[in-house]
Amino acid sequence: MPRQNEFPLLMELGAPGRRAYLLPQLDVPARPIDELIPSPYLRSEPAPLPELSELEVVRHYTGLSRRNHGVDVGFYPLGSCTMKYNPKVNEDLAFLPGFASLHPYQPEETVQGALQLMYELEQYLCEIAGLQRATLTPAAGAHGELTGLMLIKAYQEDRGEGHRDEIIIPDSAHGTNPASAAMCGYKVVEVKSNDRGGVCVDALREVVGPQTAGLMLTNPNTLGLFEEDILTISELVHDAGGLLYYDGANANAIMGKCRPGDMGFDVVHFNLHKTFSTPHGGGGPGSGPIVVRESLIPFLPVPVVERREEAAQAGASLEEIPSQFFLDFDRPKSIGKVKGFYGNFLVLVRAYAYIRSMGPEGLRLASEDAVLSANYLMRGLSPFFDLPYDRTCKHEFVISARQQKAEGVTAQDIAKRLLDYGVHAPTVYFPLIVEEALMIEPTETESKAALDAFLEVMFRIAEEAKESPQGLTTAPHHTVVGRLDETQAARHPVVRWQQGTEEGTPNDHR
Amino acid sequence: MGYPYLALTRQERQEMLSAIGATSTADLFSDIPREILLQENLDLPEPLTESELVRHVRKLSDCNISLDTHASFLGAGVYQHLIPRAVYHLANRAEFVTAYTPYQAEISQGVLQATFEYQTLICNLTGMDVANASLYDGATGLAEAALMALAITGGSRVVTFESMHPDYRVVVDTYLRAVDAELVVIPTDQGVADPTALEPFLGKETAAVLIQQPNLFGLLESASEIGARLEGTPTLLVACVNPISLGILQPPAAYGADIVVGDGQPLGNPLAFGGPSFGFMATRQKFIRRMPGRIVGQTQDGEGNRGFVLTLQTREQHIRRQRATSNICTNAAHSMLIGTIYLALLGKEGLREVAIQCAQKAHFTAERISALSGWELLFEGPFYHEFAVQAPVPWPQVNAALLKEGIIGGLPLAKLYPERPEWENALLFCVTEARTADEIEHLLQVLKGVK
Amino acid sequence: MSVPANLRYADSHEWVKMEDDGVIVGVTDYAQSEMGDIVFAELPPVGAEYEKGEGMAVIESVKAVSDIYAPVGGTVIAVNEALVDSPELVNDDCYGDGWLVKLSLPEKVELDELLSPEEYEAQIEA
């Protein structure tokens, strides 16, 4: 199949003087602009921006959208990312004018519905985590990690243990864990995995001590395996005076089955854009609320949503007691603020709507189906691919392309070939402890037919790897562009379009 | 009962369980220690069908006052502008909304190319060489810029002014305290930074000076003078700017900014109760490998077709781990896409007109308010589309009177500057192109009547 | 894998070549092939001083980052500026045009501690 013709850049379209959007006529008396603002503050030329008609812009971005895969387009088994279906109704709800058109500095009495939604969502998340309070402010999982670590630091300092400067992180962890620890001024101590894919408890014993501020753990971990020794691990860390941080990236496996708080975790983040079905939007915005144990509540970032005592006791509605919710900024031990305003509110609306649609049994079934689907795929793939940890997985699992590597076909080649079949590739080369790793997460929203179709495709690719590896190492063949040269992109970065550099000359080095 | 977002039937579950040799789902969770395995359902509300959900959530939203129905004069970081309808239709195409980070470039050319276009537009607006593919928001963007400056210079201190948005300052301070760096805030009694006040802080310990242009009070800082003072010193100039204002204001590169950040909400994004929006960051070519966040680069396939990929990924957490330039992973891609499409629709002339209309309407309103008896501008000096005025009566009276008339008044400075009793009754008004002459007239009528 | 006989080696895969006024340091053929396509080399400033074993440079491929350790202690007297525009030289000619750093003459005892070609070859085969 021939490639589609090259797609022009926005900056290569349009014509001088063309307009797509007109403003109403200025309806106050116009004055020369340099009478309002002295000319040294003004730019001498208008900023060089495109000049297109509305239809040109519409065709351009419609065309670009068609050059993109999404959950609505096809299967997206990207491990660790929980690419489940994003319910349409939640999009409509987020864009209700009563949510989308609120200014964060509006008087509290004019935003009571928004505050109530945040208050209730916090309660739901606390119940799911098995902990006591939450902040909805963090904008993403990594942002939640940073916030959570700041809380751990504040807690340790408050009890005179500020010298604790180490965070323990398993070697299978997401890169965000060590990066967040470093941003919080901590030293990172890595702990090895054992041959069952879990944290090696003996190795943990070696590194935990009076210098330990805390441990970060994903459970199930990035291999999709439940940490069987979690209770021992939490006891070890707590006994040494450290706290436990739960990376909620994989919480889709455990909703209603078990709770991080019960496992011993003190701080938990949830990725609302994974577990609670809010869309990923091409990489964000997400939302990474953190839920904490009693002892950490004083340190939460400001503001937190509170409810007036009398309303809470009476369980009164807004009709009965108006203005019962408020933002509490007066928290002397708070770590401060981690983001402008109150978090990614429109993402919170979607997650709230999801939890309300699913209810307690629905969330549990979602996790059960996610786990069942993952095990079904894992078993189905095991005749053709290496299974580095052969035990029941949770919502995702990791296979290795070791066998195929021997034929000259890598995990990357398999990933690229999947694109030809209209399937998004799994996460590749992660976790780092598995050679030629492919991490697969089907989620609970895929039908059995979709899972079977994926198995069929993977079976075919395994066959191709033996019979015609060339087709894999040069894949993809049916996408709008062929395999792109990442080496060239990194060696000579071209990161913006410049007039006269259509041929792709790199940016001039200053 | 069934659940609309679960796809497996009871029959299929059974088939799948047998295929993997399990008898029940309980088998799949036998690795969870018994003592923590939940025996009962979570204590959450029972599920709602779609129509019930819509009714319930709509009721909550109806408890809020939407700025679609009330004229608002609030700004201070979040701005109401006219947004072309096409922005929503295009940005909300499902292929954009339901995609993940474009790790598989060949089937993510839509997001990648749009991001490359975005990087170009941000460079064109700011005059800088390179831009990243977004941070969470303006406040965290500023904090990331401060950390980046610390890493580049090896300094231990960051200096800013009281005229910088207080919420932004708190965020920067929260980030800096975690790495034992200091944030110095220089007072601005007259509402703007005094460049000579920087003198005691110039030195190699100071990694950066952070300015906001226009600042929280809407005033224009002497950015060129500050830039000139920092020239030849190791200290970097970080400018936090409003992207719409760059339709008419000097690009930060012109006054020597080394890192430019800001909140992208004004570019076509809804007010959203403050989030999500996106943070933009642009810098000089020589700092490209020190920048946090994703970057999209141009390249080609084996046949020479142009294409786009995530590049310079060795800066990022998934590769460099604890030595990464930042921990950021999920960013604000979709809000950034909205901003890109907004700029494409507004275009060169459109953005300039928006910026001009904001300035015209704000100056007109400021003049009229300060002509009312008892009202006066808090500060002198050039401003863009926000201004602070002292009210002759306590501010709650003013805003209550306005609200009764369907108007959301200005932001009381007392909320952001409780430590400044002299600004106690000052209100910060913002007037954008979205406010009509009738609305401004209505505002003046109410203010006139406030006693 | 090529392991030239006229060079000495560190077990962290750097090679050292003696010259009259100092030593040239680069990465071995084994190291460059393990790294894959090199896209960037972050070199130290001239004048910087390093102890033996200290990280002094970083080379990057598309998806990996490797520290380059000083195989002997010394002061940086030159760096390979050509790598700024052509990092691929490390892949194409790691023992020649793809050199990284020139250090001042080290203590003899440190030189003696380096591996011989035979010893290094044995290490990479193991």
Image: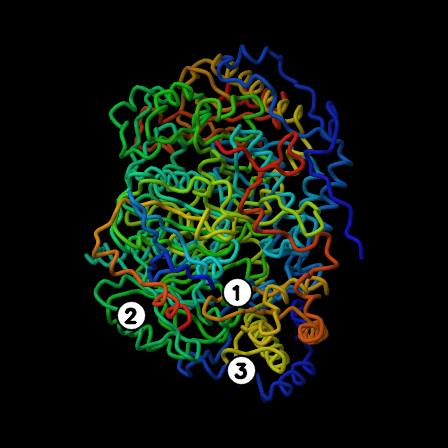
Residue C45 lies, in percent from the top left, at: 34, 39
Q: Which amino acid does the dot numbered 2 rest on?
A: Val
Mark toward the viewer: 1 or 2: 1
Q: Nearer the viewer, residue B441 or A392?
A: A392
Residue at the far left in the pictured view? A160
Tell me if mark 2 has few (under 14), some (14-19) or many (20+) residues whose alpha carbon lies within 10 angstroms of its own. many
Q: As drawn, is B143 to the left or to the right of A485?
A: left
Tell me if mark 1 has few (under 14), some (14-19) or many (20+) residues whose alpha carbon lies within 10 angstroms of its own. some
Question: Dot 1 lies on which element?
Answer: loop
Above or below A268: residue C101: above
Question: Dot 2 lies on which element?
Answer: helix
Q: Nearer the viewer, residue B225 or B285?
A: B285
Q: Which amino acid does the dot numbered 3 rest on?
A: Leu
Q: Nearer the viewer, residue A164 or B370?
A: A164
Mark toward the viewer: 1 or 3: 1
Q: Which amino acid does the dot numbered 1 rest on?
A: Tyr
